[in-house]
Image (spheres, rainbow, N blue to C red):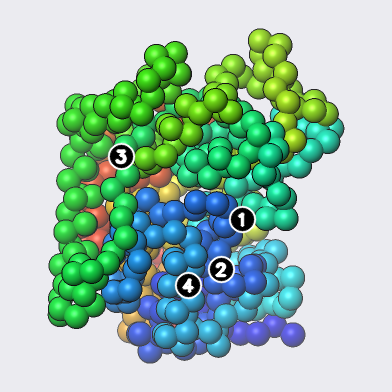
Amino acid sequence: MRERVRVAIIGAGFGGLGTAIGLKRAGIDDFVVLERAADVGGTWHANTYPGAQCDIPSILYSFSFAPNPRWSRLYPYQPEIRDYLRRCAEDFGITPHLRLRHEVREASWRDGAWHITTDRGAWEAQVLVGAIGPFSEPAVPDLPGLNRFRGTTFHTSTWDHDQNLDGRRVAVVGTGASAVQIIPQLQPRVARLTVFQRTPTWIMPHPDRPVTGLPRRLLGQVPGALSLARRGFDLVQEALVPGLVHQPLLLKGMEAVARAHLRRQVRDPRLRAKLTPSYAFGCKRPTFSNAYYPALAQPNTDVVTEPIKEVTERGIVTGDGAEHPADTIVFGTGFRMTDHPGFTRLRGRDGRTLAEVWNGSPRAYLGTTVAGFPNFFLLLGPNSVVYTSQVVTIEAQVAYILDCLREMDRRGLSTLEVKATAQQDYVRRVDHGLRNSVWNTGGCRSYYLDSAGRNFTFFPGFNRTFRATTRRVDLADYHLERTA
């Protein structure tokens, strides 16, 4: 039997829950949220590694319509964000719509509807919302010999809490945002920590602190205080946009702060040279930490910059022939962005999957709709990310989806499908807007770019511009089909 709903949502992280709450607030109850995990939270349910923390202030990394005066820290840790999302699901009545442990195997458009198959049942929906998230599928490098390693291996997003790493020899592969948080947690516990660094990361002093005393009372008791604080943090993030998008030289001040932070915390000139990026600040994702550099400077830590050649039964061999013994290998190697397995499970009008249509270079209209995929909306899609909290992007896209549904009801439409020409025009405008950005010109390779070097991640402007662009649907950009 196939259950019929108006809207099916894949994923119960910020995107999926934000969409579900938006539907509820708009008076639409005919929807289902399909989540493969055992609980809501998305990446904040999956990533339970030691030290997992958001790098956006908590007041901004939350729904504008669900402010939380009880954040314990300026930058929250994973359990607090997960609990916030649980409360949102309960408070807004989303729980009855959740279908947990329902992994979508395939969703295909045929006969004027989306036909969705999960490992626990099937649905038919007029509208499909993909809220699978860009950080949901771990990327593990295919290292020669990895299958013969006798120790344990796991990715940061699938942390093995059954493994006791105390007194062990641990190798961490990668030095991105997750690794920067994990390494200070591991270093005091392990006998030997070997960090394999391909490219160093720009690290800024961390401004995190507990929210206590007078600030906590003000946020909880003074009307409008939370909203004002949110607006302030939003403006701070927006202030970075001119340097990131238009004139990277404006970021030199932040680079100077990061260099001074490195000088203060790493006295050894050889280690400092290893940890100094050769690319412009902002080209790759910078992050915050007051503990990362001190952990790397400890006697039980080695930073290895030679490329990995192979994995043996006992450890990792680098290109210079040195073998680095390890009992456990932890991969802090990011996520599958352009080859997400979820893209292979979505089939559009002509039967091709999203992966086949994109062919490694994701493209969409307003980062939200895709030509050839009727009544399909994608959250945090290509070139939708603004340089602030991703929740800001999600809320703008949810508003766009709701406006599309309103127009479908008002005009008696059964189908909306963005025109290929409208999508191409949007992609051209985005590419033109990003041509001078630090991500494109900063001298690095990052997960922001596809294999051909195209920036498929960012929107080239302020979040206010993105919100204005997605406030109302322009039906002239869509093929329309009326309800029979």
What kind of element bears circle 4?
A: helix
Label 4–label 3 contact, CB within 8 A: no
Q: Label 2: how many residues lie within 10 Å, few (<14), some (14-19) or many (20+)?
A: many
- Foreground of the two, 218 or 64: 218
Relative to 367, is 329 above or below? above
Q: Mark 1 highlights which residue?
A: 342
Mark 2 and mark 4: span between their CA atoms?
Answer: 20 Å
Tag 4: amino acid: Asp
Residue topped by disc 4: 83
The residue positioned 20% from the left and 35% from the top of the image is: 243
Residue toward you, 462 or 249 = 249
First of labels 4, 1 by sequence position: 4
Task: Answer few, some or many: residues within 10 Å of disc 3's Cα (few below 14, many 20 plus, some between 14 and 19).
Answer: some
Residue topped by disc 3 = 205
Query: Which element carries disc 2, helix, strand or loop?
Result: strand
Instruction: Report x, y in % for residue 341.
Output: 64, 51
- 442 to 416, vertically: above or below: above
For label 4, count other residues whose C-alpha is less than 10 Å away and answer few (under 14), some (14-19) or many (20+): some
For the residues labelled 2 and 3, the Cα–Cα distance comes to 37 Å
Name the disc covering residue 10, or none.
2
x 31%, y 23%: residue: 263
Quarter of the rendering containing residue 268: top left
